[in-house]
Amino acid sequence: MLKGLFVIFGCLLIGEALKETLNIPVPAGVLGMIVFFIGLIVVGGVGDDIAAVSDGLIKHLTLMFLPSSVGIFFLDSRFDDQWPAIIGACVLGTLLAQFFVAGLLKLMIKPKDDGLTND
């Protein structure tokens, strides 16, 4: 399990190094996920150690969003007139993500052929 934790945080560290070295406006976490994804493709799958750590992280995923959501309440007064745009962007982004994932699921999941026809 410790090996899986080192792999995940190592990818995050590589993402942070890439962000600082290349000076690109992409979050280090996103770059780390790209490095992690490429590593999974090269290795050919998820090992038991990484699976154990990622299961634990997914179970506590809501706690990881808590700091950013609390930070919204401490924004400067310059954002006072922009709340409708912020809320609209959050709602629109959520809806677009749900439709995108639903479309992907529809493409990826093949219907069962149970031998029954609708003739």
Image (cartoon, rainbow, N blue to C red):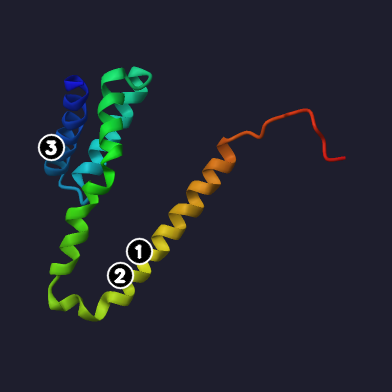
Quadrant in the rendering for residue 60: top left
Residue carrying label 2 = 86
Within 10 Å of disc 3 (Cα), the crowding (few <14, some 14-19, many 20+) is some
User: Which residue is more in the foreground, 24 or 83?
Assistant: 83
Whether residue 92 appears in this view of the structure is yes
Horizontal and vertical percent for residue 76? 12, 73
User: Which residue is more in the foreground, 34 or 46?
Assistant: 46
Name the residue type under label 3: Ala
SS at mark 3? Answer: helix
> Can you tell which of label 2 and label 3 is closer to the viewer?
2
User: Which residue is more in the foreground, 7 or 61?
Assistant: 61
Within 10 Å of disc 1 (Cα), the crowding (few <14, some 14-19, many 20+) is few
Mark 2 / mark 3, whichever is N-terminal: 3
Residue carrying label 1 = 90
Q: Is residue 64 left or right of residue 74?
A: right
Quadrant in the rendering for residue 51: top left
Instruction: Report if the CB atoms under discs 1 and 3 are less than 8 Å apart.
Output: no
Residue carrying label 3 = 17
Name the residue type under label 2: Ile
Q: Quadrant of the N terminus?
A: top left
- 97 over 76 or under it: above or below: above
Horizontal and vertical percent for residue 66? 21, 54
Name the residue type under label 1: Cys
> Can you tell which of label 1 and label 3 is closer to the viewer?
1
Q: Residue furthest right?
A: 119
SS at mark 2? Answer: helix
Horizontal and vertical percent for residue 47? 31, 19
Identify the residue at image location x=20%, y=75%: 79
Identify the residue at image location x=83%, y=40%: 118
Horizontal and vertical percent for residue 40? 33, 24
Whether residue 26 appears in this view of the structure is no
